[in-house]
Image (cartoon, grey):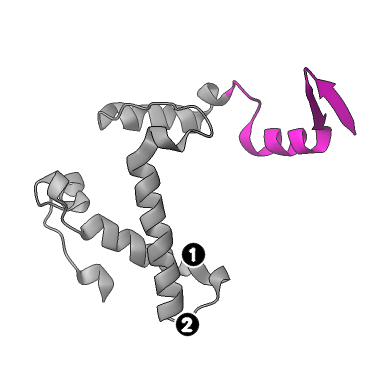
Amino acid sequence: MHFTYGFCRCDLRLLLLRFSRCGVQGSESQSPLYQTKAVMCARMKIEQEFSPVYSPWINGTVERLNKDILQVLRVLLLEYDLDFHEWPFLLPVLQGNLNHTPLQSLGGHSPVELFTGLPASLSWMQ
C-alpha cells in the first residue's frame, strides 16, 4: 500500500515498521531512553549537536576515525583469515584498543583513564 505525502511516495509498511521500532517521529523526546540519555549527557557535560544529513565534512574528525576503524577491521579480517561477515567479533578488540591507547590530544592519557580516573591497563587483551 502506497500513499503520497507532499512530494514523497511512501510505503505504509515501511513507515509502520519504522514507527514500531523507533516510535512516531517527533515523540523521541518523550521516551524514557531519550530522557535517560539527556540526564547522562548533562552529568557528563556533553553537548549534543545536530548536523545536516549527507554532510560528512561537518563531522570531519568523526568521519576520519570511522575511516580508520574500517581500515583496521579490514586488516584484522585478513590477518585472522575471517569471513567479512564476522567483523562484529572483532569490535571488542578494536574498542578496547581505542579506549586504552594514550592520545596526544588528551595530554598523553587514554580515554579510559580520563573517564574512570584509573590507570589504563592492557589486561583486557589477555
Residue span colored magenta: 1-27
Position of the N terminus, as image quadrant, is top right
Q: Residue at x 40, y 51 (%)?
A: 66
Residue type marked 1: Pro
Image-quadrant location for residue 50: top left
Residue drawn at the location 73% of the way across and 39% of the way down: 17
Q: How many marks?
A: 2
The answer to which of 51 and 22 lies nearer the viewer is 51
Q: Amino acid at mark 2?
A: Asp
13 relative to 92, above or below: above
| Residue for badge 2 | 81
Q: Is residue 108 left or right of residue 17?
A: left
Q: Is residue 14 above or below residue 48?
A: below
Query: How far from the left and from the top, in percent, is residue 72?
Result: 38, 65
Find residue 88 and name its label: 1
Q: Position of residue 27 (x, y in %)?
A: 59, 22
